[in-house]
């Protein structure tokens, strides 16, 4: 018996089925029906139904219109237990209405992330209605050195932490990923000076994005918003995305400051 087979044999089947359901919901921010979940997981509809009832009772999933199931808010409180930032849930709660508004008006997806011990953690997101709007899952960990929101967060870390990141491995995701420490440091200084960042395809070759810092009442950058979109947009559209990212970040920061 292989190590993988032995590992599977020692797992709990009920938990494996539950995780299969949560994984499929993570891939589908707009939600999935009971039938679709059963089809995708290979679990019988009756079993999926019972698992969903238990998950819904604990607010791990919630049922939307048209009997669609989506991930529930309890996951945010659980995420607080694995992040180094205890205020992440409050940031997510204040950010969500603004993200929903951005996605509805601009049509692009958007997300808010925080720095989490060497990585970037997505704590809130909204899915746009454009045909090719890109989605990010809450709880997803992203690299700290590549991407619009990531560069915003990295640029505002203490100098010693920036030095540690630049001294470590800088993985190349595309030909445009900045993996030279000096080049990345210069980019971070530019991000900090102008108050926003642009990803021109450094994390995904077909994806551009703009990011902006979310600042609390003390003037600290506590999170970052990013708005990804497909490459090939004209300059006017790019400027629109950049402006919306900045104004939304300011609005979220204002709400957070007012609730401090």
Image: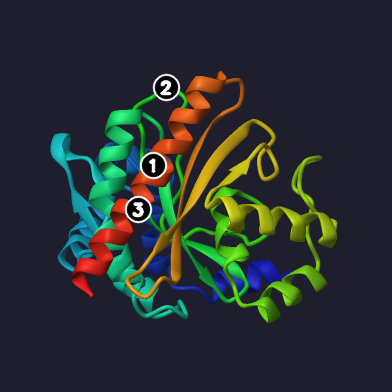
Q: Which mark lies nearer to you, 3 or 1?
A: 3
Location of the N terminus by quadrant is bottom right
Label 1: how many Cα within 10 Å (few below 14, some 14–19, many 20+): some
Q: Are dots 3 and 2 in contact, CB under 8 Å?
A: no
Q: Residue at x 60, y 55 (%)?
A: 193
Of badges 2 and 1, nearer the viewer stands 2
Q: Closest to the observer: 236 or 64? A: 236
Left or right: residue 93 versus residue 2 is left
- Badge 3: residue crowd in 10 Å (few <14, some 14–19, many ≥20): some
Rendered image: mark on residue 250: 3
Q: Is residue 247 above or below residue 160?
A: above
Return the x and y of residue 16 as percentages of the image width and height: 44, 64
Q: Looking at this view, is 56 or 168 the one in front?
A: 168
SS class, disc 3: helix
Q: Earlier in the sequence, mark 2 or mark 1?
A: 1
Query: Label 2 to label 1, Cα distance in Å?
Result: 15 Å
Residue indicated by mark 2: 131
Q: Given the current orientation, which residue lies at the most extreme front position?
A: 193
Q: Residue at x 59, y 58 (%)?
A: 192
Q: Earlier in the sequence, mark 3 or mark 2?
A: 2
Q: Is residue 260 above or below residue 101?
A: below
**Mark carried by residue 28:** 1
Indicate the secondary structure of the residue bearing disc 1.
loop
Which residue shows up at 71% across the image and 53% down it? 187
Badge 2 marks a residue whose secondary structure is loop
Q: Tell me if I can see residue 42 in this picture.
A: no
From the viewer's side, name the closer residue of 200 and 142.
200
Residue 85 % position (x, y) = 42, 78
Foreground mark, 3 or 2, reads 3
**How far across and how far down the image is residue 250, in percent?**
35, 53
């Amino acid at each position: 018996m292989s190590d993988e087979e032995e590992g599977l044999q020692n797992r709990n089947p009920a938990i494996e089925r539950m995780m299969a359901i949560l994984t499929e919901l993570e891939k589908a921010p707009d939600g999935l029906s009971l039938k679709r979940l059963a089809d995708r997981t290979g679990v019988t509809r009756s079993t999926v139904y019972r698992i969903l009832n238990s998950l819904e009772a604990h607010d791990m999933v919630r049922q939307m219109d048209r009997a669609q199931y989506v991930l529930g808010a309890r996951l945010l409180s659980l995420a607080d237990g694995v992040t180094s930032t205890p205020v992440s849930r409050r940031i997510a709660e204040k950010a969500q209405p603004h993200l929903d508004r951005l996605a509805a008006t601009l049509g692009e997806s958007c997300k808010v992330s925080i720095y989490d011990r060497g990585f970037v953690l997505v704590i809130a997101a909204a899915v746009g209605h454009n045909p090719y709007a890109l989605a990010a899952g809450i709880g997803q960990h992203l690299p700290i050195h590549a991407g619009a929101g990531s560069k915003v967060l990295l640029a505002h870390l203490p100098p010693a932490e920036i030095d540690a990141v630049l001294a470590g491995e800088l993985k190349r995701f595309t030909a445009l990923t900045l993996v030279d420490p000096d080049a990345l440091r210069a980019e971070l200084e530019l991000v900090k000076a102008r108050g926003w960042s642009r990803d021109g395809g450094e994390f995904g070759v077909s994806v551009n994005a703009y990011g902006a810092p979310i600042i609390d009442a003390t003037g600290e950058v506590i999170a970052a918003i990013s708005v990804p979109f497909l490459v090939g947009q004209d300059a006017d559209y790019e400027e629109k995305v950049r402006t919306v990212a900045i104004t939304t970040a300011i609005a979220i920061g204002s709400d957070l400051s007012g609730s401090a």
